[in-house]
Image: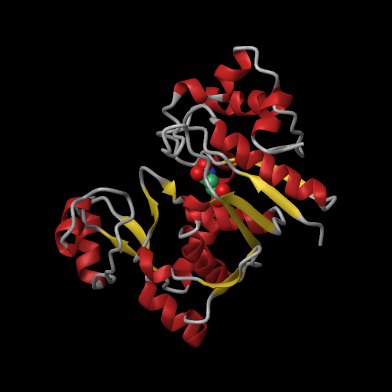
Amino acid sequence: MTLTTRFAPSPTGHLHLGHAFSALNAYHYAKRASGRFILRIEDIDQARCLPEFTQAIYADLAWLGLDWESPVRVQSQHMADYHAALDRLREHHLIYRCFKTRKAIAADIGRAPHGLDLPYRGQPLSPDQEAEHMARGHAFAWRLSLAAARQHLGKGFDDLTFIEDGRGVQVARPQQAGDIVLARKDLGVAYHLAVVVDDALQGVTHVTRGDDLFEATGVQRLLQALLGLPIPTYCHHSLLSGPDGQRLAKRDRAQTLKALREGGMDPSDLRRQLGFD
Ligand code: GLU
């Protein structure tokens, strides 16, 4: 199988230097092995993603000197694929409807309601209770049941591992994330589900991305096992930090590739600064 990497930004803002590093890393990883490099636009969260940012991603990466296969997979155009995966999980009773509000969940686990996916573990309601909520039109989320997943996979649940390039076999720890939300009315489907479906569908053999997503790999590895998907090799790279030692964030306007590009920076200088070429 041809070695295949991908860069999968979410168009929620302009790309910054950290993204440039990540994209170059994925690109060179593939090119060194005469492999394929794929660009994927992860815009399922339509409340936060804007088409103008997608256009800027294309412009920034082309300016940076990258080329990629076309057509580019734009996740919002493939929701049926993600819903089909959700249906498969539902058929195996691996997901359940959760009607609790974030506030109720935070109270349950005794933590302040920050972050979308609190490490919550729940269980399906009885058919009667569920029917009552549905009849009242209450909003709900589909959560992945760790208990059901454990039952489904048997001993395999505790033996979930993945290969981290250069670091060998890693134990996946999906338990740390709790019963994660996989779909919600306002969200469509969650990032984790779309990512594993697409990585498999696009034949991604090496997932190159920042260290901030290392923990996400545990959940994604579990989803791969439950959906019978191939397991890529993972290559998490360290994150670039700014002069103040802080992680580069999307809000640092001055650091956006657009600003550098429009300010007349030579992209070969930038590539060199980031350690490429
Ligand atoms: N779309 C994700 C992000 O922009 C990255 C997903 C991934 O590389 O797996 O943070």
Q: Is residue 79 above or below residue 232?
A: above
- Indicate the quadrant where residue 140 lies: bottom left
Q: Residue 192 placed where, x, y %?
A: 49, 55
Number of on-image labels: 0
Residue at 58% over, 49% down = 209
- Indicate the quadrant where residue 225 lies: bottom right
Q: Is residue 164 left or right of residue 117?
A: right
Can residue 73 be seen here? The reply is: no
Q: Residue furthest top?
A: 263
Q: Residue 194 placed where, x, y %?
A: 54, 52
Q: Is residue 263 above or below residue 161?
A: above
Q: Is residue 221 above or below residue 30?
A: below
Q: How is the image coloured?
A: secondary structure
Q: Nearer the viewer, residue 107 or 5?
A: 5
Q: Is residue 170 left or right of residue 47?
A: right
Q: Residue 158 placed where, x, y %?
A: 47, 81
Q: Residue furthest bottom?
A: 155
Classify the position of the C terminus by image quarter: top right
Q: Is residue 236 left or right of residue 132?
A: right
- Indicate the quadrant where residue 25 lies: top right
Can residue 101 be seen here? The reply is: yes
Q: Nearer the viewer, residue 128 or 10?
A: 10
Residue at 26% over, 71% down = 127
Q: Residue 113 placed where, x, y %?
A: 21, 50
Q: Is residue 245 left or right of residue 26?
A: left
Residue at 36% over, 77% down = 147
Classify the position of the N terminus by image quarter: bottom right
Q: Nearer the viewer, residue 247 or 205?
A: 247
